[in-house]
Amino acid sequence: MEEEKRKKVSDSLIEQVYQIRPEHLNGAGRLFGGRLMEWIDEAAGLVGIRHAQSNVITASVDNLKFIRGAYQNDLVVLIGKLTYVGNSSMEVRVDTYVESLDGIRKPINRAYVTVVAVDGNGKPMKVPGLISESESEKAEWEAGIKRREMRRQRKEEGF
Ligand SMILES: CC(C)(COP(=O)(O)OP(=O)(O)OC[C@H]1O[C@@H](n2cnc3c(N)ncnc32)[C@H](O)[C@@H]1OP(=O)(O)O)[C@@H](O)C(=O)NCCC(=O)NCCS
């Protein structure tokens, strides 16, 4: 029997950096939240594509709390990494930071995005398993199981 294909968290980890430009700002002169949501969604999708080596669609996004603002010329850093995989779904943690010129990063947001791998007909397809190596990766996997159950419950109860 063919051994199940499994990949490491580091195989799909990404870091995206953007410099905030005038077109990214809202009326209050800060980074527009909708733009950041797009970047978060994009980062999660890229992690999913790398892991599954297929197209992915976003099924849900958990917890979008904006802890601090970001302003023109700031660097915004997004780090996306897999925390948990199911059959066709993948949970990606995206941490967003604002980085000053001295390299100090301050958190803006942490989101857990679930993306689903789809085949050429748009149907959910199986993804490789995940190898959690470090203690923090193992803890994220365990927490991912709980978050998945909470999402399932919310879906079932419609809230
Ligand atoms: C995501 C989607 C494919 C799930 O459809 P479904 O009929 O529930 O399909 P399934 O029951 O086979 O679920 C597929 C996987 O998605 C997961 N899933 C479904 N709804 C979910 C939700 N709200 N949050 C997180 N994961 C979800 C399931 O747990 C399952 O995971 P598994 O294969 O690892 O066990 C479907 O809801 C969809 O197409 N949504 C639109 C997605 C889209 O277009 N996104 C772009 C932005 S608008």
Image (cartoon, helix red, strand yellow):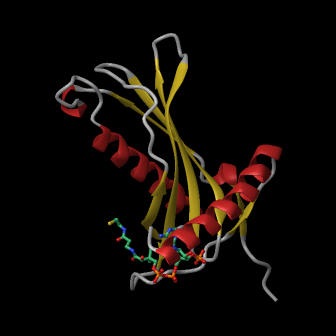
Q: Is residue 80 above or below residue 27?
A: below
Identify the image quadrant of the C terminus: bottom left
- Residue 58 picture quarter: bottom left
Q: Is residue 108 above or below residue 57?
A: above
Please state the total of marks drawn on the protein image: 0
- Quadrant position of residue 59: bottom left
Return the x and y of residue 76 as percentages of the image width and height.
Answer: 42, 29
**Is residue 99 depicted above or below 146 in this figure?**
above
> What residue is drawn where x is 56% and y is 66%?
151
In this picture, residue 100 sits left or right of residue 135: left
- Compared across the picture, whether 75 is left or right of 127 comes to left
Residue at image x 60%, y 65%?
A: 150
Residue 111 appears at what percent x and percent y? 51, 47
- The residue located at (76%, 58%) in the rendering is 142
Which residue is most to the bottom?
1
Residue 87, horizontal then vertical, whole percent: 63, 77
Pick the residue in front: 105 or 50: 105
Q: Is residue 112 left or right of residue 21?
A: right
Quarter of the image where the N terminus is located? bottom right
Could you say which is closer to the camera, residue 41 or residue 61? 61
Q: Is residue 27 left or right of residue 156?
A: left
**Residue extending furthest toward the top:** 102
Indicate the position of residue 148 as horizontal and vertical percent values: 62, 66
Rendered residue at 66%/71% (across/down): 128
Depth check: give the residue in front, 131 or 135: 135
